[in-house]
Amino acid sequence: MNVPEDLLYTKSHEWIRREGENIRVGITDHAQAELTDVVFVELPKVGASVEAKAPVAVVESVKAASDIYAPVKGTVVEANEALTNNPALINSDPFGEGWIFALKIDNADDLKNLQSAAAYKDQIET
């Protein structure tokens, strides 16, 4: 499994990339492999306020539907509209073109509650 060292992770298999005062969020390689072929993504609304650990999007595959959670409290500033026409980007490029949404975070200290790559690797290997 690919677990980039420069990202943060949640126990619910989201990855987080810090981009100034915003973060970009997607699902991990492990999560997309478990879901198999992604066929639909319900994106969050830009401008929506979200609470940490609250469901903000849904990814549906041929196998299951899975909620995608906000890793921290914030406001949705961007949703990856490319996934509307090509949800399989989540499978082919989960850490790049397959990102799901971006948040303006309310409190940068909240990022301290997320996992490092090493901690996430331990989680998925046990």
Image (cartoon, rainbow, N blue to C red):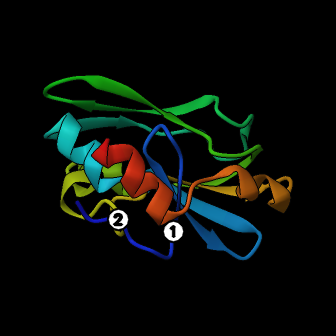
Q: If the image is split into quadrants, where does the N terminus sit? A: bottom left
Residue 27: tell me if it is visible.
no
Q: Are marks 2 and 1 in contact (CB under 8 Å)?
A: yes
Within 10 Å of disc 2 (Cα), the crowding (few <14, some 14-19, many 20+) is some
Residue 2: tell me if it is visible.
yes
Q: If the image is split into quadrants, where does the C terminus sit? A: top left
Q: Nearer the viewer, residue 121 or 64?
A: 121
Instruction: Work out whether 64 lies above or below 113.
Output: above
**Displayed quadrant of residue 45:** top right
The percent position of residue 109, horizontal first and vertical second, equals 84, 58
For the residues labelled 2 and 1, the Cα–Cα distance comes to 8 Å
Instruction: Work out whether 105 lies above or below 19.
Output: above
Instruction: Work out whether 11 lies above or below 94.
Output: above
Q: Which residue is at 63% across, 52% downward?
A: 114
Horizontal side of 36 relative to 43 (left or right) equals left
**Residue marked by disc 1:** 7
The percent position of residue 32, horizontal first and vertical second, equals 25, 46
Residue 3 circle label: 2
Q: Secondary structure at mark 1?
A: loop
Q: Which residue is at 33% across, 51% downward?
A: 83
Q: Nearer the viewer, residue 106 or 10?
A: 10
